[in-house]
Image (cartoon, grey):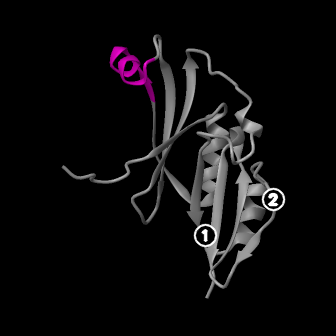
């Protein structure tokens, strides 16, 4: 038995439209959007009365997908992770390779993206940074040098 692939990473958001716009600005494409509900979904997720809307974003020339999920029921819980630092146990971070980190940071800034620290250079290999996006999602971006 072998692992076939990483299918997607899911992130819960409070504003699905804003999250879709943010990741579209980053360069991802909206693959589809749908409502998820019913006993099968409740059994998979372990939440009774589940009703959510998802938007599946994909990398245009690669296999990576990001599932953005907005829960309508049960009521989403805000545990304050939207402002948590990157070293909180279990906290997610999604990393993307970009062609131009300065341009990307500027464009994502118009969608609420804020650099957590600063853009730094790692040896002669990369320039990279972490941003906080919609709903507190931490997004890493890296520009390969040379």
Q: Is residue 40 magenta?
A: yes
Q: Point out the frontmost of discs 2 and 1.
A: 2
The residue at the point 66 percent across, 33 percent down is 15
Q: Which numbered circle lies on residue 1?
A: none
> What range is drawn magenta here?
35-46
Answer with left or right where residue 44 lies relative to residue 102: left
- Residue 9 lies, with reference to residue 128, above or below; the image says above
**Place of residue 80 in the rendered image (x, y in percent of width and height, measured from the top left):** 74, 30
- Name the residue beneath numbered marker 1: 98
Residue corresponding to mark 2: 117
Q: CA distance from mark 2 to mark 1?
A: 18 Å
Which class describes the residues within 10 Å of circle 1: few (<14), some (14-19), or many (20+)? some
Q: Point out residue 21 in the picture as x, y percentages from the top left corner.
A: 64, 48
Binning the other alpha carbons within 10 Å of mark 2 as few (below 14), some (14 to 19) or many (20 upward) gives few
Q: Earlier in the sequence, mark 2 or mark 1?
A: 1
Q: Is residue 48 above or below residue 104?
A: above
Image-quadrant location for residue 127 = bottom right
Seen from the viewer's position, the closer of residues 22 and 49 is 49
Secondary element at image label 2: loop
Please name whichever residue, 6 or 109, is drawn nearer the observer in this view of the structure: 6
Q: Residue at x 35, y 14 (%)?
A: 39
Q: Residue 117, located in which quarter of the rendered image?
A: bottom right
């Amino acid at each position: 038995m072998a692992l076939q692939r990483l299918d997607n990473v899911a992130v819960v958001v409070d504003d699905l439209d804003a999250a879709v716009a943010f990741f579209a600005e980053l360069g991802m494409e909206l693959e589809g959007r749908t409502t998820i509900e019913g006993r099968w979904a409740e059994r998979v997720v372990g939440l009774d009365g589940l009703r959510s809307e998802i938007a599946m974003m994909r990398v245009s020339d690669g296999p990576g997908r990001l599932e953005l999920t907005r829960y309508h029921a049960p009521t989403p819980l805000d545990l304050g992770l939207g402002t948590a630092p990157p070293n909180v146990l279990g906290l997610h971070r999604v990393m993307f390779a970009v062609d131009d980190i300065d341009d990307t940071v500027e464009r994502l800034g118009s969608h609420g993206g804020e650099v957590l620290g600063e853009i730094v250079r790692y040896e002669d290999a990369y320039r990279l940074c972490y941003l906080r996006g919609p709903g507190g999602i931490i997004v890493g971006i890296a520009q390969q040098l040379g």
